[in-house]
Amino acid sequence: MKKTFTAASLALALLATPLSPAFAAMPASADTAAAAFNVDKASFVEQVTSSNQFEIESSKLAEEKARDADVKEFARQMIADHTKAGEGLKTAAKLDDAAPALSPKHAAMIETLKGASEQDFQPLYIEMQTVAHMEAVTLFATYAKGGDDAAVKAFAAETLPKLEMHKAHVMKLVAAH
């Protein structure tokens, strides 16, 4: 099978690899980000709601359009885990049952996936999942350390290890494809 790498996926792979011993000795990026800024509850909930919905919708597309079984299995796991996370967020943040709205960024990403050719879909999905999980780990780590709502902060801390597992899983997909 021919491996297709975009500049963005190559850059993501490089970002995941320490470049020097000094870089490796630096604190984890999520810890650094958490110390640098705090996120308020409303912003956290808005970002997580959109991101979660993106994960579910993009992964439903991947179940249909991805070529490889490992990518389809990852997509099934994303649907299950992010559906559960969405319910956890609703409970923690005391949200109503309104359908979650996608941000313009996430809506555009879904449209890009919908319009992708059969050949381009899978690498694009993997690339988007990589970026989404890097962002999610940083956001959840930040809120877990400095959030302004105890219940939502606990949700972020409880959910973070699962997101870190997703990030590690998608990085394996990057390496394999």
Image (tube, helix red, strand yellow):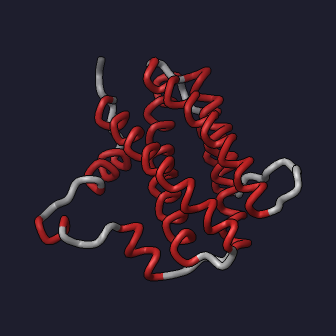
**Residue 35 falls left or right of residue 83:** left
Q: Is residue 84 above or below residue 45?
A: above
Q: Which residue appears at 30% of the width and 27% of the height?
A: 3
Towards the viewer: 44 or 176: 44
Q: 75 or 146: nearer the eye?
A: 146
Q: Position of residue 14 (x, y in %)?
A: 26, 52
Residue drawn where x is 43% and y is 74% of the image:
33
Quarter in which the C terminus is drawn: top left
The N terminus - image quarter = top left
- Counting the numbered discs, the total is 0
Image coordinates of residue 97 in percent, x first then y, are 88, 50
Q: Is residue 147 rendered to the left or right of residue 50?
A: left
Q: Is 138 positioned to the left or the right of 112 in the image?
A: left
Classify residue 49 as left or right of residue 158.
right
In percent of the image, x 33 and y 36: which residue is there?
172
In the displayed structure, 82 sits above or below 66; it is below
Q: Residue 89, located in which quarter of the rendered image?
A: bottom right
Q: Position of residue 128 (x, y in %)?
A: 50, 45
Q: Is residue 31 above or below residue 61?
A: below
125 and 136: which is toward the camera: 136
Give coordinates of residue 84: x percent, y percent.
67, 42
User: Which residue occupies 82% across, 62% down?
Assistant: 94
Residue placed most toward the observer, 91 or 17: 91
